[in-house]
Amino acid sequence: MTAVAQSSLRSTLEPKSFGRVAVLFGGKSAERAVSLNSGNAVLGALLEAGVDAFGIDVGDDFLQRLVSEKIDRAFIVLHGRGGEDGTMQGLLECLEIPYTGSGVLASALAMDKLRTKQVWQSLGLATPAHAVLENESDCICAATELGLPLIVKPAHEGSSIGMAKVNSVDELIAAWKAASTYDSQVLVEQWIQGPEFTVASLRGQVLPPIGLGTPHSFYDYDAKYLASDTQYRIPCGLGDAQEQELKQLAARACDAIGIAGWARTDVMQDAQGKFWLLEVNTVPGMTDHSLVPMAARAAGLDFQQLVLAILADSVQARG
């Protein structure tokens, strides 16, 4: 990445100019533990930079705290439902509190894997074939029509929670039942055999892609947050032309959803070299295992500079 591109990523604002910043983290979603780690990392970086920041673990008293505290802007580090799905964004807009990341519509769309796929398909962007599972008959039909193996996903969860790779109809039915404990809507997708990539975007620019490797059957929750044998390749291992194709696809995927500020797009590549879009995360993880900080480092930004750059867009977009 050129020096000019790096400079446009960084915030030029003085830390005190952000005012009093509430870092929103924790919450009640299935991704609470990850959000607590991400939020504490973000809060620590803001404080070290000299920002007047404080944390709010979003709980039952959250609305009261929003109203009673002096908040000039909010840094959203809530993963999953209740924080990443447009509801928090809508509440903050009603209270006229500027916030980081995407707006209501983009957040809601990106959190809904089914609607995201439908938008992409309508624009001719490649995403794996899928079906919605509501009963055992749907599982049998999906196995016949899509073939095995398949990947099962709750439609509104992140961090690979509730996901499973299946190799038989019996496994598919069991995985559907397990995923249904997280979400009333469950998707099953065609399995794409090949390498996985993740592409972060920041302030309208695409950061260096990361190639992912894991001995697990797929990049699951353990591989993302707990395992020590997950491989992160930067450079990602693609040739220049294919890397550019990947970055352009990620940019188009984000534009289709209406992403703002920052995000991370997950992509598979099949044996023929074709890329397939999986999903977009509008509030990606910010833990020590997280991918956006890795991509930012490859682009020349340390963690503190990344956090300030994300916060700066809340000023420019909604300040």
Image: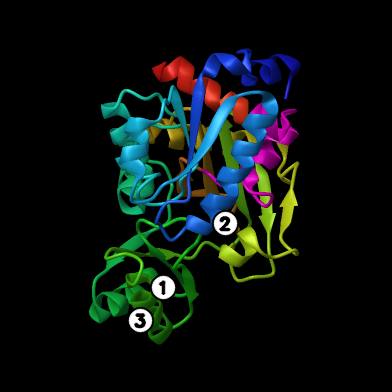
| Residue at (73, 32) in percent of width and height | 302
Element at label 2: loop
Element at label 3: helix
| Residue at (36, 52) in percent of width and height | 113
| Membership of 300 in magenta stretch | yes
| Membership of 98 in magenta stretch | no
Q: Which residues are magenta?
A: 284-306
Q: Is residue 159 visible?
A: no
Query: In the visual, does 281 lie left or right of 106?
Result: right
Gap in angstroms between the C-alphas marked 2 and 1:
16 Å
Q: Pinpoint residue 142: horizontal percent, then vertical percent.
A: 32, 72
| Mark found first going from the N terminus, 3 or 1 | 1
Give the residue at mark 3: 173
Give the residue at mark 2: 270
Quick check: 163 above or below 15? below
Q: Nearer the viewer, residue 164 or 45?
A: 45
Q: Pinpoint residue 251: horizontal percent, then vertical percent.
A: 50, 32
| Mark found first going from the N terminus, 2 or 3 | 3
Q: Is residue 293 visible?
A: yes
| Residue at (75, 43) in percent of width and height | 234
| Mark found first going from the N terminus, 2 or 1 | 1
Quick check: 232 above or below 206? below
Are there few (<14), some (14-19), or many (20+) residues within 10 Å of tag 2? Answer: some
User: Please, what is the three-letter code of the amino acid marked with disc 2?
Assistant: Asp
Instruction: Please tell me the numbered disc located at residue 147.
Output: 1
Are there few (<14), some (14-19), or many (20+) residues within 10 Å of tag 3? Answer: many
Query: In the visual, does 42 lie left or right of 160?
Result: right
Q: Quadrant of the C terminus?
A: top left
Q: Nearer the viewer, residue 218 or 42?
A: 42
Q: Extreme bottom residue here?
A: 170
